[in-house]
Image (cartoon, rainbow, N blue to C red):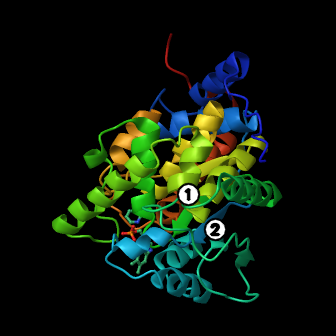
Amino acid sequence: MMQIPSIPPVADAALAARLDAAIDNKTKPRGSLGRLESLAKQIGLVQQSVRPQLREPSILVFAGDHGVTEEKISPFPQSVTWQMVENFLAGGAAINVFAAQNGCALHVVDAGVNHDFGPRERLLDRKQGYGTRNFLHEPAMSVEACARAMEAGADLAASMPGNLIGFGEMGIGNTTSAAALMHRLTGLPLEDCVGAGAGMPPEGIAHKQRVIAQALRRHADADTPLQILAAFGGYEIAMMAGAMLGAAARRKLILVDGFIVTAALLAAARMAPALTDYCVFSHCSNERGHALMLSHLGASPLLQLGLRLGEGSGCALALPLVQAAAGFLCGMATFDSAGVSDQER
Ligand SMILES: Cc1cc2ncn([C@H]3O[C@H](COP(=O)(O)O)[C@@H](O)[C@H]3O)c2cc1C
Ligand SMILES: O=C(O)c1cccnc1
């Protein structure tokens, strides 16, 4: 069974005071870099340094299929998952463009796609199965399979070279899975958790909500975060949850994308609450429920662009801001070093 790594909170009063002083001594009015200042402080706390550096950032797109697609809860067929994986491998998806634009390495993880790809460059084969089971009728996966997927994710994150990992996903049907997880893990009303996903019309969203409500009754006994993740999750979601824990255990910064990635975090953070200390929330997605999910976590997302894509697109777009935050803390002169007069105190 997956050993949940112990994740220490990043809080360190002495280091926090040194970071505040380092940020305030830069040649700028105090506070003038706004949100970048709290971000720089967070990165410093995660890296335990007043001169944090981001090395070899990468984005991992976790892909998996969902048995619940049988219930017509997505406007797209399940096969779009593997077809989009092919598109990622060929370089033609939105995430390819945005990652390349920001010089960010991109890997696709086959967590459980219902398709055989064979060995391919940029594809990390961590296949746990050919899609999950239909959670309307039975748990999406067994608790053991869920723990194995988490463990594979934790190992993968630990083996990544850099100190920042952006999390993205691809899996037709996974907003249904994420909505069920959100409801069970936060207790928020189901109607606030269910949205359009890849473009369901209003009557389709009502159907999706009925399917989830019925599944919630079927799995009323799923109680621990692992049981809940096994009942309603997906291989990609379980693997992301484990990978986030593995990343934080190595003090890597975690860039969180949209609704589905945040649902994986909700589950993982229930297992190790300090996990969110290591997370930067790239954006607030337009998927209904994401804003509430973020407030539940006390998160302040960097961007609000009306995205509702997934794939890690928000991570790639927010990466330059994260680099700017670490960059100003490392690179800017201080009032002293630059011979600039500080404000009179
Ligand atoms: C062409 C295409 C590309 C995508 N890239 C990400 N998603 C996004 O949509 C899916 C979730 O929506 P639902 O739960 O409604 O199926 C996920 O695969 C997600 O990453 C896509 C969806 C489509 C159709
Ligand atoms: O918020 C997201 O990441 C999202 C929203 C809709 C569809 N796919 C992903």
Pointers 1 and 2 in contact (C-beta within 8 Å): yes
Mark 2, Cα crowd under 10 Å, few <14 / some 14-19 / many 20+, is some
* Residue 319 circle label: 1
Amino acid type, mark 1: Leu
Q: Nearer the viewer, residue 1 or 159?
A: 1
Q: Is residue 321 visible?
A: no
| Above or below 74: residue 18 | above
Residue 156 image point, x, y percent: 77, 61
Q: Secondary structure at mark 1?
A: helix
For disc 2, the marked residue is 104
Q: Secondary structure at mark 2?
A: loop
Marks 1 and 2, the one that precedes in the sequence: 2
> Residue 223 lies in what quarter of the image?
top right
Amino acid type, mark 2: Cys
Give the residue drawn at x 74%, y 85%.
121
Work out which residue is located at the far top of the displayed protein and give it. 345
Residue 129 image point, x, y percent: 66, 73
In this rendering, position of residue 82 left or right of residue 31: right
Residue 82 image point, x, y percent: 55, 84
Give the residue drawn at x 62%, y 51%.
241
Give the residue drawn at x 71%, y 80%.
122
Some atom of ligand 1 lies within 8 Å of the CB belonging to the residue at label 2:
no
